[in-house]
Image (tube, grey):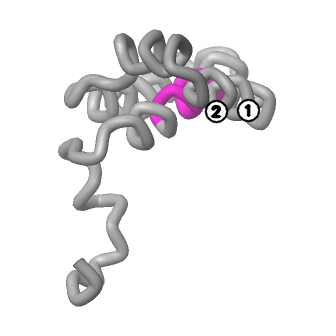
Amino acid sequence: MSILLSAAAALSASNPRGFAVLAGVLGRRWSAPGYCAVVGGSHRVRPQTQLVVCLIVALVVSVCLVERTPLHPLLSSGDRSRS
């Protein structure tokens, strides 16, 4: 299911109208940290696996749409010599 959702998100983001829709919800600076917090907190209530997969796909899409989020330092390799 995650591969299908990821492919659908990639196809949506590849055209201007789809990108605008995705960016309207997932392309905000707060989106990635918000989805990360929801994914982390969701383990306390033991949701259905499909819900967690959807949230993780939304997190990945939001990190891809916005270049600078508070999560990016955590996602970097730590090698600053290439910057």
Quadrant assignment for the C terminus? bottom left
Where is residue 48 drawn, in percent x and y?
Answer: 68, 16
Where is residue 37 drawn, in percent x and y?
Answer: 32, 30
Magenta region, mostly helix, strand or loop?
A: helix
Q: Is residue 70 left or right of residue 41?
A: left
Q: Which residue is mark 1?
A: 7
Q: Amino acid at mark 1?
A: Ala
Q: Which residues are magenta?
A: 53-59
Q: Are marks 1 and 2 in contact (CB under 8 Å)?
A: yes
Q: Is residue 56 magenta?
A: yes
- Secondary structure under tag 1 reads helix
Q: Is residue 70 above or below residue 13?
A: below
- Secondary structure under tag 2 reads helix
Please give the name of the residue rendered at 52% of the width and 12% of the height, measured from the top-left corner.
Answer: 17
- Residue 81, picture quadrant: bottom left
Q: Is residue 41 magenta?
A: no
Q: Which mark is residue 10?
A: 2
Farthest-out residue, front: 16
Where is residue 28 drawn, in percent x and y?
Answer: 26, 24
